[in-house]
Amino acid sequence: MRHRLYLFNFFCLCMLLLFEVSCGNKGSLLNQAELLIEEHPDSVLNMLRQIKNPHQNLSKRNYALYSLLMTQAMDKCYLDLSEDTLMDIAVRYFTETTDSIHAAKACLYAGKVSQQLRNPEQAIELYLEAKDYFGNSADYKYQFMVRNGLGTVYSNQWLYKDQLEAYREACHYASLKNDSLYLCVAFENMGFAFSGLQKEDSAIFYQYKALQMAKACYPTGASGIYHHISSIYKRKQAYSKAIQYADSALLSAADSSSLYFTKGDIYNKMHLYDSAFCYLSKSLLSDNIYTKASTCDALAEVYEGVKKPDSAYLYMRLYNAYRDSIENQTHTTAIMELENLYHHSKLKEENYLLKESAISKSRFIYFILFIVSILLFFIGILYVFFYNRKQRQIHGAQQLVRQKEIEKLQAETEFISLEKKLLELREAFYRQMNSIVVPKLHSLMYPDKSDHKSRIKITEEEWGFLVENTNIAFSDFTLRLLKVYPLLDIEDIRLCCLIKMQLRLSDIADIYCVEKATINKRRERIRKNKMDINDGRTLNDILRNF
C-alpha cells in the first residue's frame, strides 16, 4: 500500500513539473528539479532537456542553475561528462555571488568534468575551491564527495600522501553522515592509499573494515575488497591467506579473469606449478590485454620453474608482443584524450559565442529604437562596444595560444616519460630473458640474491643466445653496431653485449678471467681505435644510448 502511495505521489509531482514546463514557468521548474535531483535524476534530466534554448529563455541565474542541474543529473545517471560545456557558466556565475552552496556544487561538478577530461591540475584546483566554499557546512554528503574526488585525482598522479589525507577527511565526513555505504567506500580508499605508501599492515586493517561494511550494506562490492586483500597478502608472501581471499573473491566476482591470474600467480610464487598453470590458463582466455600480458609473463616464470626454457621463451615473446600492443594503445589513448580536450574547448567556445551572439542581437534591437532620438550618443556607444569586443577577442586569442603551448608542453613531457619507461621495461626484459637463456648470468645480474664469486664460463652456444637476445630486445643492436663501426670483430661485439646488459666491471673481468684494468684498456681501444670516438664519452655511455 505504501509503495503504491509513493508511486502515485511521484506521478503527480512529475505531472506538475510537466505542466510547469508547458506553461513556461522555468524558474519554478528548476527549483522543483533541484528538489528531485537526489532521488530521481533520470526524470530531472528528461525534464531539463525539454527546455528549449535555455541560454535565451532563462535569466542569468536560472541559466547557471540549469547548467549545474544538467551536469549533476548526467553524473548521477552515470553519463559521460567529457562533452559537458555548461559548467563554466555555473562556476562563473555562482562564484561571483554570495550563494556559497551553489558555488561549492558548481566547483565540485566542474572538477568532475575536468577529471574525466584528464586535466588533473584544473580538477584539483576546482575541488579545493569547492572545499573552501563548503567551509564548515553540515552537508556531509557533499563534503565527502569533494574529498573523495580530490583523493582520486591525487591517486592517479601517484601523490599518495595527499591522497591519504584527502581520504582521511572523506572518512571523517562519512562517519558524521553515519552512512554505511559511504564508510565502506572511505575505508576501501584508505586501504588503497596505504598500499600506495607501501604500508601493507595499515592497508589490510582498512580493507578489513571496508569488508565488514560491504557484507552488511553492499555485498556485491565485497569481491573487489577480497581481491585487494589477496593482493596485499601476496606481496607480504603470506600465500595461504592470499589464496583464501582470492577464493572468496571468486565466489561473487562478475569477471573472474583477473582473479584467476592473481590465484595462478600466487601458486607460481609458491612453486606449485601445476596449480599455477591451471589458473593461468584460465586467465589467458581473458579479453583484457593487460591481463593477457601479465599472464604470459607469469607463464614464462612457470615454465622456467619446470625447466622448459623453450616454452618460457615462447611466452616471454608473447608477453613482449602484448606489451607492444599496450604501448601502442597507450599512445592512441593519449592522442584521443588530447583531441577530446581540444574538442571540449571548441564546444565551450561555440557555446560562449552563441550566447554572445544572442546578447548582441538583443542589444542591436534596442540600439535601432534608440538611434531615432540620440544618434550621436549611439555612435559613441557603438564605437566603445566594438572596441571592447575587439579587445576581448584579442585577449581570447592570446589565451588560446597560451593554452595550446601548455598542452603541447604537457604532451611532450608525457611522451618523454613514456619513452623512458619503455627503455626501462626493455632493459628489464632483456636482463630477464638472458637470465632464462643463460642461467649462469642470473647471479651477476641480481647480485643481491647471490654472493657468487667464481668465474662464469660462457659457451659458444650461449654467446649466440646473448647476441640474439640483444638484437631482439634492442632492434638488431649488433647489426646496427657493425654497420656504423665495421672495424669491430666478434669478440668486440660480445663485450658490447655484456656492457649493454649493464654487468659490473668486476663481473665482466671474471667472465674473461682477466684483471679489471685489462677490460678498461680493451674498452678504451674499442672506443678510440675501432669507433674513432674521442668526445669524452665512455663506451658504456655510447652503448647505453645506441
Image: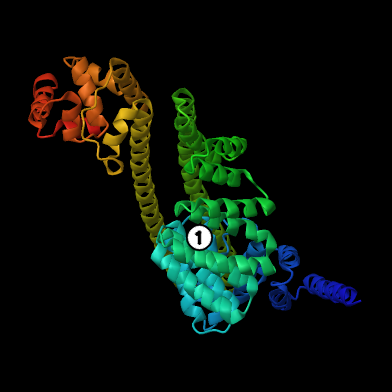
Q: Amino acid at mark 1?
A: Ser
Residue topped by disc 1: 114
Q: Report whether 447 appears left or right of 15.
A: left
Up/down of 467 relative to 507, above or below: above
Please state if 420 lies on the left or on the right of 2 as rendered.
Answer: left
* Residue 436: quarter of image: top left
**Residue 420 in picture, x, y percent from top left:** 33, 42
Coloring scheme of the render? Answer: rainbow
| Rendering coords of residue 412 (x, y %) | 35, 45
456 sits left or right of 469 in the view: left
Q: Give residue 319's position: percent from left, percent from top.
A: 48, 33
Residue located at (47% from left, 68% from top): 126
Q: Nearer the viewer, residue 317 or 98?
A: 317
Q: Report whether residue 297 is seen.
A: yes
Q: Position of residue 258 (x, y in %)?
A: 58, 45
Residue 63 appears in the picture as rendered? no
Q: Is 347 placed above or below 474 here?
A: below
